[in-house]
Image: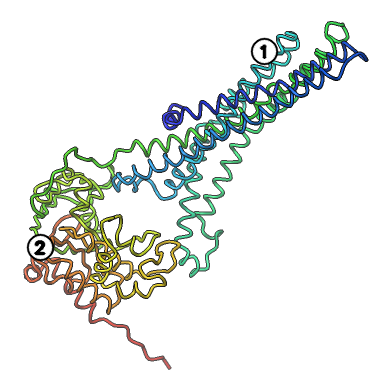
Amino acid sequence: MRLLFNLIKEKKVPIILCVILAALGSILLIVPYALIFNIVDYYIQNGIAASAQPVIRLLGIALGAVVLRYLLIVSSFVFSHIAAFDLLYKIRVRITKHIGKLPMGFWGKKNSGQMLKIVQDDVESIETFVAHHFPDIASGFALPIVILVYLFTIDWRLALAAAIPLPLSLLLSYMMWNGILTGQNRADITMKYHKAIEGMHSNMIQFVQGMPVVKVFNMTVDSFKKLKQAVLTYLDIVILWSKGVSPYRAIMKTIVLGGGIFILPLGIYYLETGSLDVSTFILFMLLGTGCCKGLVNLMYMISRMEMITAGIKRINDVLTTEPLYEPETPVIPKDYTIELKNVGFRYNEDDPSVLNDINVTLPQDTFTALVGPSGAGKTTLINLIARMWEVTEGDICIGGATLKEMGTKGVTETVGTVFQDVQMLTNTVSANIRMGDTKATQQDIEKAAKAAACHDFIQQLPKGYDTIIGDGGEVHLSGGEKQRIALARVILKDTPVILLDEATAYADAENETIMQEAVSRLMVNKTVIVIAHRLSTIIEADNILVIDKGRVAESGTHQELLNKKGVYQKMWKAHTRSREWSLTKKEALV
């Protein structure tokens, strides 16, 4: 609960107002019943001599109380919902801003399904609590207490009978919360419930993203076993949870809504003995039997609190995850020479090292190529230089300043990156090239697009640079088109250090030549690091680093590495053989 109140404390004023208004509104429910009691008592006392005037006045008061109650309840829900939705917005913004500061290692531990559940479902549960449960708590406690106090002033004997459901309800709530009689571990079930939802989200995303494979192999939801199992697991958890809650809720409703079972026999006995009048008996049957009705909603809230609390803990786990270190005074690099000093890296503490003892100096304005077998650590090294991760050992420096000393802003202003798998935002082409650079004019954007050889195909889109691309966009771009837009981003950004991770991987033969020319123009007077699988594209590199098993196995120019007759020479021979290879059509056998 403390975590919840820490999240909602900035909205304490509207929440307090909604609680007060809900409590006052629920208390006004007593007024019509009390007035009915007075009217019945008036007619019993005066008989045929009774006048209609006092009754009309009392009915007017009752009507006014009903209208005022309505206004108070509506006002309470207005305050609670405004506070809830504003809170949801601020929490989601806070989470989004925070995860943008986290290292990529965080995403290794959290898959997309888990984050979707946290940002969507867990945050949404706070809205339910603030907008609905707070008013319900106020009504659930205020109404029974005020009614019982009022009834005790009328007849303490029947008031005691009317109060019986109150301790029983609290006892049942305690038993349900602790799994007494059902033998359930509620905390364990709650944890499994959240994991089951995360599993469904993750597998549904995987199922949708893998739809081409699903179609090709004629798979169905049933044959996609992981998704089917995730849904069945969720179903089992919900059934188990319901079995633990349903008996208590059934007993609760029977006792509370059937509260007359305690008042009726005692009231009839007192009527027969003459120690109770009819009007008082009617009042207790009207008010006493429903005085604890709000406790039903209270018990429902208690059963939901297990889920809400677990969700809030997950939100708090994200918000308390340590972000990347940011210096108070960022250091500005004196030049753009890149130094890797004893760099080592592992993704998690228990994982084996991916990179070991990397010691390299890449002078300013030079072209360095990274080559090596798949899984050798090339992309990981690029990500470390872009400070997507923090190095586990050693330091990476640009111009004598470590990446930590430069800070995130300093690194992003210095380093531009084009990844192999390019992501497009669901926005216009212009916005995707601009990427938050508010100073860039449309002329600047088009100039960068021309330099990246993507201006012509953008002009052919339905709305040109105003065409919406990305998921759910107006058009679908090929992999090569996306890479050219990503290249335009880096050209517009004009950073002194450029990192290219197989930037022409999705280009066809014609467009690859165009892109390579664009990359060549981009590399002028820049410190450039390129990951390349087509070795013929990097033979002019100033330095080639051969990465093998997380280490720099060889380094030098193209010719120097061929002369060493090591790993690079083997890769070059394989590359030249592959260029000579082609598919041939075999003659049919007769």
Residue at 34% across, 44% down = 99
Mark 1 crowd level (few <14, some 14–19, many ≥20, 10 Å Cα): few
Q: Nearer the viewer, residue 288 or 115?
A: 288
Q: Nearer the viewer, residue 467 or 305?
A: 467
Q: Nearer the viewer, residue 308 or 414?
A: 414
Mark 2 crowd level (few <14, some 14–19, many ≥20, 10 Å Cα): some
Which percent across, then down, holds residue 482? Answer: 33, 67
Q: Is residue 334 above or below residue 319?
A: below
Give the residue type that dot 2 points to.
Thr
Q: Is residue 316 left or right of residue 254?
A: left
* Residue bearing the label numbered 1: 149
- Give the quarter of the image for residue 514: bottom left
Give the residue type that dot 1 points to.
Val
Q: Residue furthest right?
A: 48
Q: Is residue 92 left or right of residue 349?
A: right
Element on which disc 2 rests: loop
Q: Is residue 161 left or right of residue 71?
A: right
> Could you tell me if the residues under marks 1 and 2 are in contact, i.e. CB atoms within 8 Å?
no
Q: Is residue 64 above or below residue 534?
A: above
Residue at 26% across, 50% down = 388
Q: Nearer the viewer, mark 1 or mark 2?
A: 1
* Residue bearing the label numbered 2: 366
Which percent across, then down, holds residue 574? Answer: 20, 73
> Which badge, 1 or 2, comes first in the chain's sequence?
1
Element on which disc 1 rests: helix
Gap in Å between the C-alphas at discs 1 and 2?
85 Å
Which percent across, then down, holds residue 531? Answer: 21, 63
Disc sitting over residue 198 in the figure: none
Residue at 46% across, 66% down = 213
Quadrant including the C terminus: bottom left
